Amino acid sequence: MSRILFASCVAALLYSTKIQAQRIPAGALPMNYNGGFAGEAGAPRVAAFSLFDYGPFPYYGSDPYVLNRGSFISVDNFVKKIRSGVGLTAGHQTNDHSYRSTSMSLAISPKFSHLGKYTFAPFADFSFGRTHYLMDPLYNPVHFVSDNFSFKSGFLLNSDKAYIGVSAEILRDGSRYAARFLENVEYYLQAGYTFQRTPGSDFSFTPQLVLSYQRIDYERIWTYEPITVNWLRLVDLSLGFRHKKFIWGINNTGLMAGYQSDRFKLQVTNFYTDRHRAGEFANLSNSEHFYLGAWPFPDSPKKYFGCISLRYLFKENSFPK
Amino acid sequence: MITEEKQDELIFDFLEGNLSPDEEEAFLILKDESEILNREVRLWQNTYLQEPLPSVEALEQKLVIQKNRDTGRLSTRIYAIMLIGMTLIAAGDSFDKYIAGSIPQSKAQLTPSQETTAPISNLVPEYSEKVTSVGRQILASPESKENIAPLTDRLATGELFALPVLKGEELMIKPQAHTLEDFRFTRPEKDQRTHVQRKWSRHEQRLIRKKIWQDHRSRKVNEFRSGNEPYVVPLNTSNF
């Protein structure tokens, strides 16, 4: 029981500081989970993303209505001279009660094509962020600033109708904690595929999956007993349908609808529920129990999620319609 | 002893007047004493031009190409165009008259009139000797005027004239009664047009789209294999 409670606190901490920041559907920000998407389009691309949450704070008994909002923008292009894609992402995210963070990342991804059908793209992603914490992990009001730096690496393998990519946060350093190299590495697996009769069909079905795995080693507070938490999360399962230029579907944020052409994409997602998290599994290495990371608040007020994303290509798609 | 080169220089200076009076007097003495020198001086004198050289301005004026020559006469090209135009106008006028004369303007012209039936020799004098006996009887009879068939039909059948009968590929074209309306151009109806746009089935449309896609990908692959610029295989932005 103590282990479950301790793991729950860890999960809550991760939720408030990092998991909220990861509620980004696959494809909304190309380089959010995998830097190999930098220059993947072969043309200059701009993407913008905005999210907002409105609902109860995860700590029972706190202020029930909290507004979380964030805005991100990314620009990437393929540079022929260096045969690589370069992408820049910047964003700002706030939670009125707990934190305000600003982040910026630079991804460089060399491209290697095989037979003109597949592209293998390893990448290196350098991120810098500054977070103003307004509340400590026990939700006492405080104010301190934390700078953090991270280095991610991985690869992306894609064709014109499918992709799979793996990324890992190899190095993480911050002003409030010691640098970690190849410790507690968080892995992301992102994949997607298009089901379509012919490349020019009016109807298509595109599922995309984002999985996260992290192994966390802790020590119990009083007995210093080592505890290992294997954290597997379904970050996003996006099921997108398209008919001509209209898209709809479902993703980690909710129900999605929008407009998509070769160059322009507009996607709006909304959801309204009394369960504000699901699809997370944690296994304690010293326990045989699994539990679902969904918080049962039977009397909790409704929670509203929403996000909107834009994407624009500055050149026409080279593939026929 | 004067060398040949020195001699030429003396002769040149003498003829040009470059010698001093003493030198000129000494040269004249030498010229009188030497027949060879006298002959050389005469040869040199024959090389001089008698007429004056033309002026530089006159030479430059001759080199200038005269573009705008207002001679007051039309060029040959314009004369040719006028001749061709006048010929076409005259031919067109004659053609109009021919058309107007050959095409009967009304149905009344198709039926033989009083002047065309008798005498037959006045109508077609060149064919009078070929009129058959049957034709003469019919045309001469006043009672049969109302029942006379159109002259053109009688001509075609050979009843009136002993026309040569052609066989095989030399069949004579049967003359027909034409009016101006027959020569007017009429656009054929939409259903009668020869060009018909084929409608592809959905399966055929899918195959066509697939073939276009495969051809495009093959071109891209060939560009990559031929060593062209680095190629990035992008995800289909219509779906992702």
Image (spheres, coloured by chain):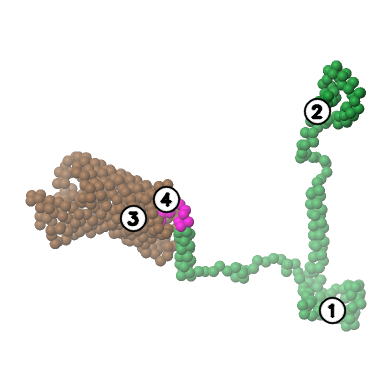
Chain colours: A brown, B green
Q: Is the same chain shared between marks 2 and 3?
A: no
User: Which quarter of the figure has residue B139?
Assistant: bottom right
Give the camera-side residue of A146 and A72: A146
Residue pointed to by mark 3:
A156
Residue pointed to by mark 4:
A43
Q: At x 47% / y 68%, what residue is drawn? A: B207
Q: Residue furthest left?
A: A223
Q: Amino acid at mark 2?
A: Glu
Which badge, 2 or 1, comes first in the chain's sequence? 2
Quick check: A265 above or below B7? Answer: below
Label 3 neighbourhood size at 10 Å, few (<14), some (14-19), many (20+)? many
Q: CA distance from mark 2 to mark 1?
A: 102 Å
Q: CA distance from mark 1 to mark 3?
A: 93 Å
**Residue at disc 1, secondary structure:** loop
Give the camera-side residue of B91 and A113: A113
Dot 3 falls on which chain? A
Residue pointed to by mark 1:
B164
Residue B193 picture location, percent across and down: 61, 69
Q: Is the same chain shared between marks 2 and 1?
A: yes
Which badge, 3 or 4, comes first in the chain's sequence? 4
